Amino acid sequence: MQRRRLLLPARQGQVRRLVSLFSFTGLNRHYPREYTLTRSAWQTTGGGRPVLAFDDLPLSRPQLHSIGQATRRINLWHGSVRSGKTIASLLAFVIAVATAGPSGLIIVCGRSLQTIERNVIDPLQEAALFGPLTRHVQHTRGATTATILGRTVHLIGAADARAEGRLRGLTAQLAYVDEATLMPEGFWTQLLARLSVPGARLYATTNPDSPRHWLKTGYLDRSDELDMRAWHFKLADNPSLSRAYVDALAAEYVGLWRRRMIDGAWVVAEGAIYDMWDEERHVVDELPAMRRHLLGIDYGTTNPFAAVLLGEGVDGRLYVAAEWRHDSRAAHRSMTDAQYSAAVRDWLGRLGVAPEWTFIDPSAASFITQLWADGHPGIARASNEVADGIRSVAALLAASRLLVHRSCGGLLDELPGYCWDPAAAEKGEDKPLKADDHSVDALRYAVHSTAHEWRHLLTTATRGNARP
């Protein structure tokens, strides 16, 4: 069978840079013969237009197009998870590094140094993805610089608006931004101002967010007015993904997150957060035998204190088995940390349960100290990524892998009314309304802090084993 031949319009300089990169790093020897990219890839059409010719190169057509076209001041890859946008953007960035001039810094930015290492450096050092190119990427874990193709690359985390100060005074020629929607707007604006060398470029990736997010309204929606090009990627644009993997991935995202992370759409967070909640479907009167228990605690002094006991059933589902709450306003009685600690231990004792781990609101430092002093086992600060935690709970509810015992009155009252904050949505932010959220927060702590341990339950559910 004749191999498919893909011809892409390109500028002569782009082709030569790409060919030089593949030759210099040995990538052309990394792929099988039918994938080899050499100078013979440089061709012209009958009209003399330069083209790139690839014989089944293991990159999709959208990836190849974006790499060849990434010549604007701002180049943005956006769309669904695992759609191939990161690999394409990294190749475009590395090509730019290979041909960068001597003036101006080269920068990689992300939410934190750890996310930069995980999302940028680690893939570039993965031989299965980049082959011999990995020999030209050096980085010591925790260091704020890396070396790519012999050039020093500065790694800058931008967790909040204060990170903008790290950019002041520098002059840059290239920047790569991982997950641009997570960057503070002031940091992004300052970064563009620092890209002042003639021909300077910014390469960025992101998953979709709110359509009112500053990146969408200020840049994507105005790309025709700016020196900017953007490419929208979908799961179908990554031909290397198996059907089974796509199905398993889709099972992890429901509602808002499915529309953003799977469909690649910029949609607003509005209405009920757990819109899949159904009391008839999710509430049980009997519990199975449990393999183990986990405890999530949302600490409150003037606000209600909520402890939610999560059990892993022998049937492969998670159950909210019990709940303990104290509302100091309703009871007209405040409790000290020592009293809360004693009350929780007494409650667990009456249940005959010893949780393997207890996940606590990270801001409750004094209560965590009290539990340590009282010898409470398995204490851990909860993972408090609110949006990701909500997504974890929502995925389990949608797959009927998380059920709630009828005795958990506080949680049952809160779940149906747990809503997105419309005022935050108007500003392009995804935040829950801060009201009646104590037991749902405790549940989120227990669920999301152990997400890596139960993710497989969603795959099981996609094979038809979910509760009717």
Image: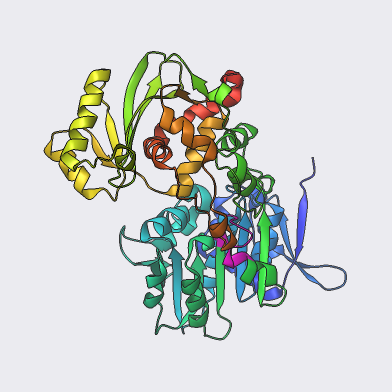
| Residue 15 visible in rendering | no
Q: Position of residue 154 (x, y in %)?
A: 39, 71
Task: Choose between 143 and 157: the one closer to the eye.
Answer: 157
User: Does 221 sit left or right of 130 as displayed?
Assistant: right
The total of numbered circles placed on residues is 0
Query: Which quadrant of the figure contains the N terminus?
Result: top right
Q: Which residues are magenta?
A: 205-216
Q: Quadrant of the C terminus?
A: top right
Residue 164: give x, y in percent of width and height. Answer: 41, 74
| Residue farthest right in this picture | 46
On the question of residue 2 being in view, the answer is yes
Q: Residue at x 42, y 39 (%)?
A: 444
Q: Depth check: give the residue in front, 120 or 354.
A: 354
- Residue at 27% across, 28% down: 356
- Residue 206 occupies which quadrant of the picture? bottom right
- x, y percent for residue 229: 67, 69
